[in-house]
C-alpha cells in the first residue's frame, strides 16, 4: 500500500526500529526493494534522487511505484531524495511523491531555514512530508553523491531549525559518509544522543552502506528511524554484471536484468532485517 512517509516513520519511532530507504534508478531496483519488503513484512521507502531526473521519467516512475505499492500489503513510501531545486520538489509533489527532501546543507543556518520553511509550507498544503539536513556527509568510495564537507550537526542548531521550519524529519550528520568508508568509520553516537535529546521529530541517517552493524543498532536505539542505502546495492548489481562480461558469452538482456534484480535482493534483505531491530 502507498503510505505517507511521516506515518511510516512515526510508527518506526514508537516501535524503536528503522525503515530502509533504498535509492533506486530503474524498474529492477524498485521491484527488488518492494519484493524484499513484502517477503520480510516490513515497510520500505523508495527514494529517487533529484540527480537522476535527467535519466528517469519522473511522472512515469511515480505512476509505476504507486501501481506496484498497491499490490503489496506492506507500507511503501515514495521519497524525493537530496533535492536542491524548488522546481524539482514541486514536480515530485504533483506526481504523487509522499515525501520530499530539500537539501539546503550548503547554505548557512539562516538561509537553510528560510528555504526549508518555504518548501515545508508548499509540501504541507499537499499533505506531503519534508526531510531536511543540517551538516553534511563527505563522499566515500563508489558513491555518485555530491561531495560534502563532513560538517557534523550541532544539537542546538537542530533544535532551532526544527522549531523554525516545521520540518517533519531531520537528517543528522554524525560522521557517516555517502558511499563506502575509505578508513575506519568514525561515527559520533554521543552526538546523536544529544541531537535526540534536543528534538523530537524522527531522525534520518544517510550513509547506511558500509556502516558496521553494531553502530547501526546503537543509532536506532538513539532514535534513528530512517536509514538511506544506495552504494552497497549498486555494488552488488555492478559486480553481477561484471561476472556476465567476464564470461564473454552473449545473454539476452531480459535474463541479465532479471538476474541483476535477484543479485540485489540479498543485500536489501540484510539491511531490512538489521533495521527492523528484532
Image: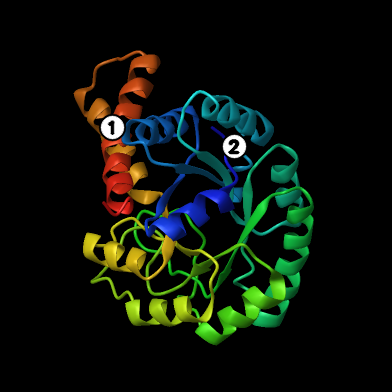
Considering every residue shown, the one lying at the far bottom of the view is 156
Give me the residue at 35% from left, 34% from top.
Answer: 36
Q: Residues within 10 Å of mark 2 (few under 14, many from 20)?
A: few
- Find residue 206 and report its horizontal and vertical position in percent: 44, 61
Residue for badge 1:
263
Question: In the structure shown, which secondary structural element does the residue marked by tag 2 occupy?
Answer: loop
- Find residue 34 and report its horizontal and vertical position in percent: 43, 33
Residue for badge 2:
55
Can I make out residue 75 in this image? yes
Rendered image: mark on residue 231? none
**Nearest the eye: 210 or 127:** 127
- Is 94 left or right of 97, judged from the image as shown? right
Depicted 269 relative to depicted 15: above or below: above
Please report whichever mark, 1 or 2, sits nearer to the chain's N-terminal start. Answer: 2
- Is 152 left or right of 50, judged from the image as shown? left
Q: Residues within 10 Å of mark 1 (few under 14, many from 20)?
A: many
- Is 10 left or right of 239, judged from the image as shown? right
Report the coloring of the rendering.
Answer: rainbow
Question: In the structure shown, which secondary structural element does the residue marked by tag 1 occupy?
Answer: helix
Depicted 273 relative to depicted 156: above or below: above
Amino acid at each position: 500500500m502507498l503510505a505517507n512517509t511521516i506515518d511510516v516513520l512515526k510508527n518506526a519511532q514508537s516501535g524503536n526500529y528503522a525503515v530502509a530507504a533504498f535509492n533506486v534508478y530503474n524498474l529492477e531496483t524498485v521491484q527488488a526493494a518492494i519484493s524484499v519488503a513484502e517477503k520480510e513484512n516490513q515497510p520500505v521507502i523508495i527514494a529517487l534522487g533529484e540527480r537522476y531526473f535527467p535519466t528517469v521519467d519522473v511522472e512515469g516512475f511515480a505512476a509505476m511505484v504507486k501501481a506496484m505499492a498497491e499490490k503489496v500489503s506492506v507500507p511503501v513510501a515514495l521519497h524525493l531524495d537530496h533535492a536542491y531545486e524548488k522546481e524539482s520538489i514541486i514536480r515530485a509533489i504533483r506526481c504523487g511523491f509522499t515525501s520530499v527532501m530539500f537539501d539546503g546543507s550548503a547554505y548557512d543556518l539562516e538561509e537553510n531555514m528560510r528555504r526549508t520553511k518555504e518548501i515545508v509550507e508548499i509540501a504541507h498544503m499537499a499533505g506531503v512530508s519534508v526531510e531536511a539536513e543540517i551538516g553534511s556527509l563527505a563522499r566515500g568510495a563508489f558513491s555518485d553523491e555530491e561531495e560534502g564537507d563532513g560538517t557534523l550537526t550541532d544539537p542546538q542548531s537542530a533544535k532551532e531549525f526544527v522549531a523554525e521550519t516545521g520540518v517533519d524529519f531531520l537528517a543528522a550528520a554524525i560522521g557517516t559518509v555517502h558511499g563506502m568508508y575509505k578508513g575506519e568509520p568514525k561515527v559520533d553516537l554521543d552526538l546523536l544522543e544529544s541531537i535526540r535529546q534536543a528534538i523530537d521529530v524522527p531522525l534520518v541517517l544517510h550513509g547506511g552502506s558500509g556502516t558496521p552493524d553494531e553502530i547501526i543498532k546503537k543509532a536506532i536505539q538513539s532514535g534513528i528511524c530512517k536509514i538511506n542505502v544506495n552504494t552497497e546495492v549498486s555494488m552488488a548489481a555492478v559486480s553481477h554484471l561484471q561476472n556476465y562480461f567476464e564470461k564473454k558469452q552473449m545473454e539476452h538482456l531480459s535474463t541479465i536484468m532479471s538476474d541483476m534484480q535477484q543479485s540485489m535482493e540479498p543485500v536489501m534483505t540484510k539491511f531490512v532485517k538489521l533495521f527492523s531491530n528484532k
